[in-house]
Image (tube, rainbow, N blue to C red):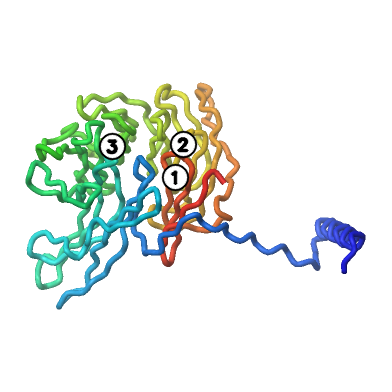
Amino acid sequence: MISPCSVSRFRLLRRLCALFCALFGCCTIAPAPPQDLDKPVQTIDEEITAFAFAPDGRIVYAVRRPYKTKKYDLEHDDIWIQDAGGKRRRIFQGDKFTRGERPFTYTVDSFRWSPNGRILLAQFFTTTLLDDSGKTQDATATLVLEDNGREVKLGGSDSFINPGGNAAFVADNLTIVYSTPAVKTPHTLYSFHFTNAATGPAGNCFEGRTFIDSDPIPRTNSAIAVERDRSQTGPPRLQHLDLLAQEDRELATLDGYAGGLSVSPGGRKVAYFIDNEVLEVRDLSAPAHFTRLRVGLGMVRWSADEMQILVKRAPEKKSGDIVEITLPELTVPIAGRPIPVLEPTLNPVLHALTFRDFAISPDGKFLAVVAPGRRNLQLFPFPR
């Protein structure tokens, strides 16, 4: 039996050895083993290609499904929904989805829900075989589905917007705004279009103007967008767009834009990268108030209270570590002085392991992550 005195002497010895290591740069005591990853409260053991939380906490997710025809190996992802109690049901069987006579393959890139949580916008990346020589064509398209899996025939015609990406509903749960490529070189610029679940295609939105990126302001008819002219000679401009009225208000002229545009859950702030290192966070009600943080380019998610942001430090669909950052006060920079770039404390999430995708639940209570490799989806309590 080991006595309490022996334990105390052992602890004292460890402290003395640690001090010796710090002073003289050597150590004979092995480092402590890394902390084990906490067990998730839920796991979906499938190869997940995309997922999203519904407003009520349900999770829609796509599962990779390769299948063979007589001539080709294709991929047609399935779509599933998990309800709040953990029950799962497949709402869309990919191998039964066809369009036209030519074979095509697709993977689900992302999802967006209608504000009422009844309709889904599933973004597909498709590759279609054009002829027998093997020539193919890639496109981004959007499938419109009810949450029971029934396809929503837009205006009674087709449920498939092709081409069409970054689609989102406005507040009426019927009108959809989506983008198509307008200029492809040297950087892709997009134009906006309307369609409607009841009446079908409805024309152009902000006709003649081109944008690099956009993100809707939740539960409104508005979006934040980064606009740039077709010649791509002028600087990018941050715009507040009223999509239905087609009115705009310039918020700021940006020093650059590298991606990651993300509007906060309450629509009060917006974050985006101005280069591959610096994240800019701006107050939407007082656009002159902002801050710059040296983080590293990646994917941004907001906490429910908008006081913290999480950044997966890697491009979308690439694996990287996730760090949590407490936002400093947003202020007006001093005129005539360089705008400071702060070095925030980067708190590692889930022991600094790498993940391919992640999201925070609408109530802010859960963090969902997709690990590389098997790509299963895990749900953890949040904040941790």
Residue found at the far bottom of this picture: 70
Residue at (14%, 35%) from the top-left corner? 204
Q: Mark 3 points at which residue?
A: 116
Marks 2 and 1, how far apart at CA: 8 Å
CB-based contact (under 8 Å), mark 1 and mark 3:
no
Q: What element carries label 1?
A: strand
Residue at (84%, 60%) from the top-left corner? 14
For the N terminus, give its image quadrant. Answer: bottom right
Looking at marks 1 and 3 on the same chain, the residue that comes earlier in the sequence is marked by 3
* Left or right of 345 on screen, residue 1: right
Q: Mark 2 points at which residue?
A: 304
Looking at marks 2 and 1 on the same chain, the residue that comes earlier in the sequence is marked by 2
Q: How crowded is mark 3: few (under 14 residues within 10 Å), some or many (20 or more)?
A: few
* Left or right of 359 on screen, residue 21: right
Q: Residues within 10 Å of mark 1 (few under 14, many from 20)?
A: many
Residue type marked 2: Ala
Does residue 282 lie above or below 44 as drawn?
Answer: above
Residue 261: x %, y % from top left: 37, 40
